[in-house]
Image (cartoon, rainbow, N blue to C red):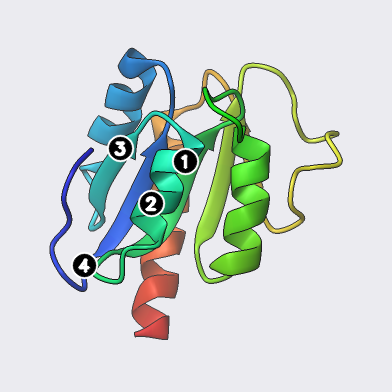
Amino acid sequence: MGYALPDCPVALVVEDDAAVRDLASAVLEETDLDVIACESAEAAISVLERPDVNVALLFADVRLPGAMDGLALASTVERRWPDVRVVVTSGYDARTDDRLPPQAVFMQKPWRALDVLVQAERATLAARAAA
């Protein structure tokens, strides 16, 4: 798990596959967002609940270890932190899954770095507008 500068918008990467987590983190490190990466939804919730971390973007895989998967995490984030831009990713097409929150963006794996950067830019702009 990484650390963010106070008041700097954060991209929170939640992925159980270390190689994919590292790749997503490396792509997002090229943006204006600080990056915090973790492997479970429960760890992500712990980050989101920290008052010193301003999460602007959640980038989460559907399949995660633990009691909560990425779709449940996305729903929780949309309900508790509605200003966070949510991107859900998976190797299978989850757009037809009823649990995918309406405001969430779905990206099928393998995703393109450009698509991730576009979502990061949108999250950054929204975070700046809200500040």
List x then y, in percent, for residue 56.
Answer: 40, 62
List x then y, in percent, for residue 87.
Answer: 55, 45
Pointer 2 with pointer 4, Cβ within 8 A:
no
* SS for callout 4: loop
Of the residues tagged 2 and 4, which is closer to the observer?
2
Q: Earlier in the sequence, mark 3 or mark 2?
A: 3
Of the residues tagged 3 and 2, which is closer to the observer?
2
* SS for callout 3: strand
Q: Quadrant of residue 129?
A: bottom left
Pointer 1 with pointer 4, Cβ within 8 A:
no
Of the residues tagged 1 and 4, which is closer to the observer?
1
Distance from the alpha carbon under mark 3 to that under mark 2? 12 Å
Instruction: Identify the residue shown where x is 62% and y is 17%.
Output: 91
* SS for callout 1: helix
Distance from the alpha carbon under mark 3 to that under mark 1? 12 Å
Instruction: Provide the residue designation for mark 3.
Output: 37
Instruction: Provide the residue designation for mark 2.
Output: 46
Other residues around mark 2 within 10 Å, as few (<14) / some (14–19) / many (≥20) = few
Instruction: Identify the residue shown where x is 40% and y is 16%.
Output: 17
* SS for callout 2: helix
List x then y, in percent, for residue 47.
Answer: 34, 53
Instruction: Provide the residue designation for mark 1.
Output: 42
The disc placed on residue 8 is 4
Q: Quadrant of residue 97?
A: top right
Residue 100's place in the image compared with 38, above or below, is: below
Visible residue check, residue 103: yes
